Image: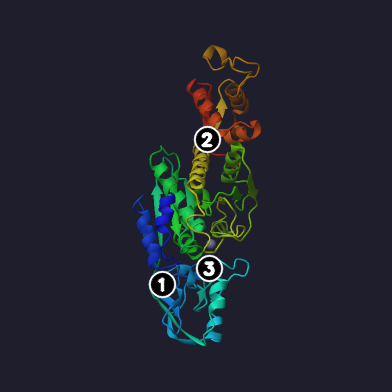
Amino acid sequence: MHSLVAELYPICRSITGDGVRRTLEIVGQHIPVATTEVPSGTPAFDWTVPREWNIRDAYVMNARGERVIDFQRSNLHVLNYSTPIHRKVPLAELRQHLFHDPAHPDCIPYRTSYYAENWGFCVTRQQLESLTEPEYEVRIDSSLTDGSLTYGECVLPGAVDDEVLISCHVCHPSLANDNLSGIAVAVHLARWLQAQPRRLSYRLLFAPGTIGAITWLSRNHERTSRVRHGLVLTCVGDPGSFHYKKSRRGDAEIDRAVAHVLSARGVAHEIRPFHPYGYDERQYCSPGFNLAVGCLMRSAWGEFPEYHTSADNVDFVTPSALADTLDLCKGVVDVLERNVVYRSTNPFCEPALGRRGLYRSTGGSGIGDENLARLWILNLADGDHSLLDTAERSGLSFALLADCAEELARHGLLVPVSSGASGE
Ligand code: ZN
């Protein structure tokens, strides 16, 4: 995953253009990806697909012919979606088009101007202060033309049509945690899912932020009724502890599944309520859709100093944090896949587990987690409680309960009533 982040890092992406296409091409070397091109001007609910932006080069050059600000050194130097320009610019005018971040003076900030035409450069304070000549040659060799918006999908069918939507944005240029980390985890989650037996179907969506998700939703309005669970993956590669933002519903199965897997790991994490700002969960959770989609992060966006600056680089994300996130996602998938509601075939008193070899001596004084898991499952197997309900109520891990329940079912002590959380 970390080498995929490193491979994608140099590409200058935006909400449209060749950077997204190249990114999806590389993703497509790992998993099957179908790309869709939606022409500029296409309406998408209250929005319109914008003109396509591409950039080849950009610089601010001093009188000695030196590039004092150079896109080739960092693509963050250019205000993303800058209109083309090539002329001498007086310093006073140039300053109006320079962006720096006083809170992080040594970093290049990431700034965009998608929907208001402008040109600009993003600089460190040192670069800003070094500009003392009366005028500079400014060149932004970009184009803003009728083209298309590009998104990619990897669909992995399961036994049922019910879908899990895994969504990540692909519009940021050289920024690693936000959100090459999300792309890398999604790719490797898909590779793992490909090798698993699947009850549910999975759709991994790689789309530009906001307009990409809105465009996808507008073209898949009816399909969204199949989306039972979803996760936006973002900022999942830094060493910080997990933050999970719940879906707008707040008590959806995905919300409970993530909370359970996080708490079962016994490490610090934070669960936050839904909020109508953030990433594309805003679109999936808009009232017309109200999909059960939450947002999984490690450090929360906007709350780590490297956020939207050149310090969010390949070194800021670590192989172990990426692997840890992937492992968490697999745990969540396991809950969604195996969250069955059972009914006991022996509801009158406990069935005799010992003679079936299902009550095993622990050799100590306690009952042991496996034996306790069987008792909890059998007690709550009333046709109303799911295994996730049982996990929450017992404090035992879902994986243990699911393994024990499958064993009890093989012994004829349980029959499945339905899949999925109760009360939905
Ligand atoms: Zn961002």
Image spot of residue 276 (x, y percent) = 62, 60
* Drawn side of residue 28 relative to residue 300, left or right: left
Q: Label 2 belongs to which residue?
A: 418
Image spot of residue 194 (x, y percent) = 38, 42
Pair 2/1: label in front: 1
Above or below, 204 relative to 14: above
Pair 3/1: label in front: 3
Between the residue at mark 3 and the residue at mark 2, the CA separation in whole angstroms equals: 53 Å
Label ID, residue 299:
none
Write the residue at 59% across / 68% down.
Answer: 105
Image spot of residue 412 (x, y percent) = 50, 21
Q: Label 3 belongs to which residue?
A: 108
Label ID, residue 52:
1
Count residues near mark 3 (Cα–Cα under 10 Å), then give few for <14, some for 14-19, many for 20+: many
Of callouts 3 and 1, the N-terminal one: 1
Count residues near mark 2 (Cα–Cα under 10 Å), then give few for <14, some for 14-19, many for 20+: some
Image spot of residue 208 (x, y percent) = 46, 62
Which residue occupies the extreme top position in the image? 355
